[in-house]
Image (cartoon, rainbow, N blue to C red):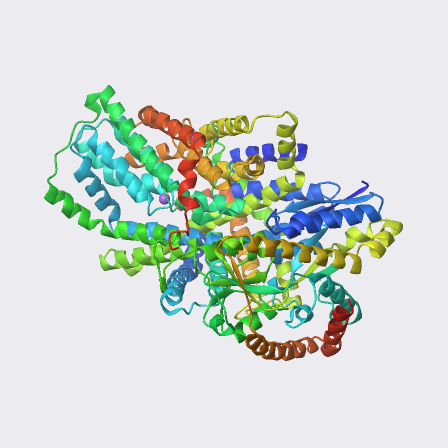
């Protein structure tokens, strides 16, 4: 290849992000450029919140960021994290990209880097060591939830937040420093939750969806010949990549669910109809608050929200 | 790969010119990173990229939650010392072992092991115990060889028996669970004590003059000595039991992360020292000050190592080594033996921390790619690091003894250390051949409460 | 000159005190967090982010002192050679000057990153403490470290007697 991009990534080596998503990215890039552009993965160069700085200054060419790790910087990205959307991670990721193009882009929260994909993981559920069978039992639990909408939902449910980065979740649960964690199904395998949090309390649509972006150094992109730039813009960056990555989130969610069903001592408890109703009321409160917050960033948040709902329903 | 090897050589040169490790690794790491990210070492683009990585590394390492165990465990060790616990530990082991041939040296080894359970550093263990045990061994006319060697060797246990600063830094560099590493160090640590006791017996068997028997203590004396060390035992069980999940009784679950264990240990040691009248305002300040100074120095070298290992990572050295091993189809076990050989050679000249910082970024990816357990490799690295502390010509523990005792030549100490060194090699072989010794405890962690 | 060195040593009590207070708070807070969580089921939610900030304070407050003194970890394998060749002083001078000077670039970058965090509005999760304060603090204390190292290097060259306390 004429151009080899360096990808910086932070998840565990075997996690879907590194085992499937970046390889998919490389595959798409190579295909679109007839092998003229490729990429190699480097792990552990810096912790998650440092990734955007690294990309901005060219310490690596591309990376993945989780918006919740940088409170204060990202507000509009909370919109896609809201509970209540119906549909797969693929549908959510495509809708996310379209809403970004039309509305969210204007807030310019990713200034300094080139956004090449936006995606969300599958619906996040509550994973605990002691079984939780009703919504009321969540109150008083010590739960690891990342920042952003997840935190708002946790507070509304009366849970006490515990702050640890995703790779430390296993240790935190094993040492009982937390009673549970809110993460998508894929983490049951990706972070070995089947061993330390045997029970899942499942709310259809999830308690929230985490928001991610793939980002790229602007100079790296500018240095590529025009025809390669065009090929990447048309066939990889934006909606195509967001869709493919969303698909992988769905795929690894399924693997996590199968792993749970196949592990002795693991159980999935689905929320009852009454609990779901109760949760929907909480979701509405959180939504109202977040929409107001996003409005503050100069975006027509309600319109963007409605667009996401429609786009997801249309797929 | 060439760039990485040149960088590695350059760090060695700078370090030998006495540039502090953080600056040697930081400088070479930065320029190397710039070279990898730009067209040359001094291209503007490469330097900007490297500086950004360095800037983030400085701020992120200083605020790494996992590293907070370091100041807290150092603090615990220093507070405990103010409470006079080293002396009491020694009195107990002496009451039980002193009347054997070589018994006072055996008591010294046992007390070193006990002190290691509350102190995270080998040098601090050796320095403390030399002040306590040396006068006693001289009183009983123990040979200088045996007395100094038993402290120098016994002191190395400080970094293997938890808590351990070296294991924390290994855990941090390799993203391995620090709690599991600590628990994994227990059996090899106890094994170390036992083998050192054999080394003492062997020395006395060869030369009975070197370690005459001390007085026999009655059971009354033994029990009263035991009563005074309850505090050490309590602290150790609080810290390690908490990490292991041993106090998980519903509804109370006193289980700790390493940072919390360190915080509980430090607070406990503070209260013990306070209750024994061992702390004034000014001595508390001294302890806190010494802790922050040590912590700042350790954080600095970690920052330097991270910068350097980012360069090594970008330059693809680990991948190149893995490719080499695969291409020549070398047996994994042979690779391990080669790595151990390199460690023992490096250990002749390098001080423990520098050795770890220089080698782990290179060997760790290779070893794990061969299917070896990261926890096991961490313990292996610490055991070879322990060996380096008593390997001539540069053995820091030996130098500490020389510094504290004064009128003994380092040659004498190194000579006395030989049986202990052989015991260490034997222990290393056991750990390499039977990984179970390391892995059995961590595998059962967190499972106790269920 | 001597009085300047003495003054610098006296002033250094204040950052040391700051570091000690940060460490003591860290210890007490960790203890309270565990007790509150285990016994009262009410952990201190902001404990993690406060731990991070306290660590930055305790490490960087004392960085100038350990760097200008001989507190940075170094390998003393060649000390004998240097002292036999009577080059110890020259080597120390060069080491301090180089170390101090090369800190200039990281300091600048830490400052730029802090300003960037300020521009983006980065705050901590629970207490919404602006992140750039920590960056400013680290940049400032590293700058003091650099100056202290350069001055120490110059003193090794021009007034080595003022540094006698370093070689106790
Ligand atoms: Na120890
Ligand atoms: Na050595």
Judge left or right: residue B154 versus residue B350: left
Q: Quadrant of residue A238?
A: bottom right
Which of B390/A193 is in front? A193
Percent coordinates x, y for residue A203 in the rendering: 59, 69
For the N terminus of chain B, give its image quadrant: top right
In the image shown, does B435 or C125 lie closer to the viewer?
A: B435
Q: Say whether residue B358 is left or right of residue B276.
A: right
Q: Quadrant of residue C21?
A: bottom left
Image position, residue B350 (x, y; %): 47, 33
Residue that sits furthest to the top in the current view? B206
Indicate left or right for A235 with B323 as reference: right
Query: Which residue is drawn at the image coordinates 46% and 68% (left, top)?
Result: A141
Residue C63 in the image: state x and y as whole percent: 48, 53
The residue lying at 49 percent from left, 70 percent from top is A138
Quadrant field for ligand 2: top left
Side (left or right) of B376 relative to B47: left
- Residue B48 in sight in this render: no
- Counting labels gives 0
Residue B235 placed where, x, y %? 30, 52
> Can you say whether C35 is above or below B400 in the image?
below
Look at the image and tell me in which quarter the C terminus of chain B lies: bottom left
Residue B19 higher or lower than A20, as above or below = above
Q: Residue at x 42, y 45 (%)?
A: B442
Q: Is residue B61 visible?
A: yes
**Identity of the residue furthest to the right in this view:** A227
């Amino acid at each position: 290849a004429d151009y080899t991009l360096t990808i910086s990534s932070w998840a565990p080596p075997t996690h879907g992000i590194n085992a499937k998503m970046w390889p998919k990215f490389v595959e798409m890039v190579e295909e679109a450029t007839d092998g003229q552009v490729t990429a190699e993965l480097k792990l552990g160069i810096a912790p998650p919140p440092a990734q955007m700085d690294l990309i901005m200054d060219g310490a690596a060419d591309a990376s993945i960021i989780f918006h919740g790790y940088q409170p204060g910087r990202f507000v509009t990205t909370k919109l896609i994290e809201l509970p209540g959307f119906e549909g797969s991670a693929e549908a959510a990721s495509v809708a996310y990209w379209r809403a970004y193009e039309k509305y969210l882009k204007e807030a310019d929260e990713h200034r300094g880097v080139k956004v090449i994909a936006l995606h969300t993981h599958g619906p996040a559920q509550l994973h605990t060591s002691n079984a939780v069978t009703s919504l009321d039992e969540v109150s008083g639990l010590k739960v690891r939830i990342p920042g952003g909408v997840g935190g708002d939902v946790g507070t509304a449910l009366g849970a006490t937040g515990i702050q640890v980065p995703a790779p430390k979740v296993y240790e935190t649960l094993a040492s009982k420093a937390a009673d549970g964690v809110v993460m998508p199904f894929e983490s049951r395998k990706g972070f070995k939750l089947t061993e330390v949090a045997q029970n899942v309390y499942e709310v259809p649509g999830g308690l929230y969806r985490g928001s991610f972006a793939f980002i790229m150094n602007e100079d790296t992109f500018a240095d590529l010949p025009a025809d390669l730039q065009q090929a990447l813009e048309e066939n990889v960056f934006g909606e195509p990549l967001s869709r493919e990555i969303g698909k992988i989130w769905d795929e690894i969610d399924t693997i996590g669910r199968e792993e749970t069903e196949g592990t002795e001592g693991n159980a999935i408890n689905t929320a009852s109809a009454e609990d779901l109703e109760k949760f929907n009321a909480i979701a509405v409160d959180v939504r109202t608050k977040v929409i107001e917050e996003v409005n503050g960033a100069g975006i027509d948040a309600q319109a963007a929200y409605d667009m996401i709902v429609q786009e997801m329903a249309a797929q | 790969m060439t760039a990485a090897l040149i960088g590695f050589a350059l760090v060695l040169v700078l370090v030998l010119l006495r540039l502090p490790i953080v600056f040697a690794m930081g400088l070479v790491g930065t320029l190397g990173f710039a070279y990898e990210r730009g067209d040359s070492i001094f291209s503007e683009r490469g330097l900007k990229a490297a500086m950004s990585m360095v800037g983030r590394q400085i701020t992120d390492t200083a605020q790494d939650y996992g590293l907070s165990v370091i100041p807290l465990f150092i603090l615990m060790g220093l507070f405990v010392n103010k409470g006079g616990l080293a002396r009491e530990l020694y009195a107990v082991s002496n009451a039980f072992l002193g009347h054997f041939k070589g018994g006072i040296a055996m008591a010294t080894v046992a007390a070193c092991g006990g002190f290691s359970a509350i102190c995270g550093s080998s040098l601090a263990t050796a320095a403390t115990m030399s002040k306590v045990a040396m006068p006693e061994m001289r009183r009983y006319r123990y040979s200088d060889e045996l007395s100094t060697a038993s402290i120098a060797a016994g002191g190395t246990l400080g970094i293997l028996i938890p808590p351990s600063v070296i294991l924390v830094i290994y855990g941090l560099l390799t993203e391995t669970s620090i709690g599991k590493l600590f628990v994994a160090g227990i059996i090899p640590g106890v094994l170390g004590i036992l083998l050192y006791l054999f080394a003492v017996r062997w020395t006395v068997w060869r030369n009975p003059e070197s370690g005459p028997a001390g007085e026999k203590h009655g059971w009354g004396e033994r029990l009263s000595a035991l009563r005074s060390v309850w505090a050490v035992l309590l602290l150790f069980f609080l810290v390690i039991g908490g990490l292991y999940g041993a106090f998980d009784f519903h509804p109370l679950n006193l289980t700790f992360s390493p940072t919390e264990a360190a915080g509980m240990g430090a607070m406990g040691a503070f209260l013990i020292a306070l209750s024994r009248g061992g702390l004034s305002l000014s001595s508390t300040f001294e302890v806190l000050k010494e802790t922050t100074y040590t912590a700042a120095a350790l954080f600095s070298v970690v920052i330097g190592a991270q910068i350097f290992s980012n360069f090594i990572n970008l330059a693809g050295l680990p991948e190149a080594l893995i490719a080499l091993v695969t291409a020549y189809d070398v047996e994994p076990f042979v690779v391990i033996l080669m790595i151990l050989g390199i460690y023992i050679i490096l250990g002749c000249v390098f001080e423990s921390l520098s050795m770890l910082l220089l080698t782990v970024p290179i060997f760790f990816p290779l070893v794990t790619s061969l299917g070896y357990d990261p926890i096991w490799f961490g313990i292996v690295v610490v055991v070879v690091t322990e060996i380096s502390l008593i390997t001539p010509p540069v053995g820091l523990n030996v130098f500490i003894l020389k510094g504290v005792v004064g009128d003994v030549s380092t040659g004498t100490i190194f000579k006395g250390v030989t049986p202990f060194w052989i015991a260490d090699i034997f222990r290393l072989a056991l750990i390499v051949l039977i990984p179970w010794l390391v892995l059995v405890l961590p595998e059962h962690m967190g499972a106790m409460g269920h | 000159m001597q009085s300047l060195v003495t003054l610098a040593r006296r002033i250094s009590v204040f950052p040391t005190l700051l570091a000690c207070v940060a460490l003591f708070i860290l210890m007490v807070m960790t203890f309270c967090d565990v007790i509150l969580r285990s016994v009262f089921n009410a952990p201190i939610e902001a404990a993690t982010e406060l731990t991070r900030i306290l660590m930055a304070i305790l490490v960087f407050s004392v960085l100038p002192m350990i760097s200008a003194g001989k507190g940075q970890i170094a390998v003393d394998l060649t000390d004998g050679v240097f002292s036999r060749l009577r080059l110890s002083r020259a080597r120390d001078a060069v080491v301090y000057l180089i170390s101090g000077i090369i800190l200039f670039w990281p300091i600048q970058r830490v400052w730029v990153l802090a300003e960037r965090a300020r521009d983006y509005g980065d705050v901590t999760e629970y207490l919404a403490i602006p992140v750039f304060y920590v960056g400013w603090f680290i940049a400032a204390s590293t700058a003091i470290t650099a100056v202290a190292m350069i001055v120490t290097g110059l003193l090794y060259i021009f007034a080595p007697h003022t540094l006698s306390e370093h070689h106790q």
